[in-house]
């Protein structure tokens, strides 16, 4: 029987992963706090977010971080990336397809920008808070980087075209897919 990485396996190892990769500490704390409040209602969402974030790390992080993560799942672990099954060694050697996302047209980018800025300033004037907390920023970045709409090469969202590293810093910015 194959040892294929799944969201359920990721959730079961989330606490162990939280000691290896700082961002997983945030995910684990968030998962634990939500699980206490609502039982298992969010298991699927957190499992998928954690799984997608692992795929992001495996594809674009340093080899030693990817190795630490894969070691938690065994030497025979296989991972589905872009619809294809890759072995542990293929992942560590970077032998998988990397795809670039198509960005929205320039007019849509401008409209998205003006909508975001106007909404942001109205909320800022009322609440007088500009930036998200450091914890909220890291949580948003994890969500964005684990999203299928995230383009790694440009560090942008392929839905709204925003630079994720900038947009996530602002307290009242919003995800176009309503993930945060």
Image (tube, helix red, strand yellow):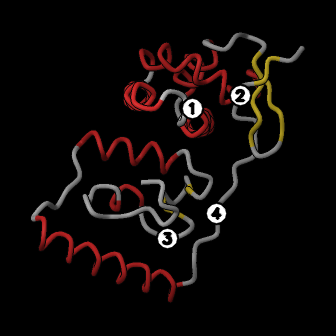
Residue pointed to by mark 3: 161
Screen quadrant of the C terminus: bottom left
Looking at the image, is 98 positioned above or below residue 123?
above
Ranked by sequence position, the earlier of labels 3 and 4 is 4
Distance between mark 1 and mark 4 Cα atoms: 28 Å
- The image quarter containing residue 19 is top left
Ranked by sequence position, the earlier of labels 1 and 3 is 1
Distance between mark 3 and mark 2 Cα atoms: 29 Å
Secondary structure state at the residue bearing disc 3: loop
Secondary structure state at the residue bearing disc 4: loop
Instruction: From the image, state whether disc 3 or disc 2 is nearer to you.
Output: 2
Circle 3/circle 4 CB separation < 8 Å: no
Q: Is residue 86 left or right of residue 57?
A: right
Residue pointed to by mark 2: 6
On residue 123, the disc is: none
x and y percent of residue 148 in the render? 62, 53
Residue pointed to by mark 4: 101
Distance between mark 3 and mark 4 Cα atoms: 10 Å
Residue 168 in view (yes/no)? yes
x and y percent of residue 51 in the render? 61, 34
Residue pointed to by mark 1: 43
Closer-to-camera residue (29/144): 29
Distance between mark 1 and mark 3 Cα atoms: 29 Å
Closer-to-camera residue (95/36): 36
Closer-to-camera residue (167/97): 167
Q: Is residue 111 left or right of residue 73?
A: left
Looking at the image, is 108 positioned above or below residue 46?
below
Secondary structure state at the residue bearing disc 2: loop
């Amino acid at each position: 029987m194959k040892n294929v990485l799944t969201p359920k396996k990721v959730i079961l190892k989330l606490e162990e992963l939280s000691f290896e990769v700082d961002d997983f500490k945030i995910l684990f704390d968030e998962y634990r706090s939500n699980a206490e409040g609502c039982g298992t209602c969010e298991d699927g969402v957190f499992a998928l977010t954690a799984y997608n974030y692992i795929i992001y790390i495996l594809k674009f992080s340093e080899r030693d971080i990817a190795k630490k993560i894969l070691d938690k799942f065994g030497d025979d672990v296989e991972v589905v990336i872009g619809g294809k099954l890759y072995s542990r060694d293929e992942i560590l050697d970077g032998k998988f397809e990397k795809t670039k996302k198509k960005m929205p047209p320039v007019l849509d980018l401008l409209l998205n920008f003006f909508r975001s800025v106007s909404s942001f300033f109205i909320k800022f004037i009322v609440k007088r808070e500009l930036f998200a907390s450091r914890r909220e920023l890291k949580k948003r970045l994890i969500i964005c980087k684990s999203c299928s709409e995230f383009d790694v090469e440009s560090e942008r969202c392929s839905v709204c075209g925003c630079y994720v590293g900038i947009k996530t810093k602002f307290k009242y910015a919003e995800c176009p897919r309503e993930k945060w």
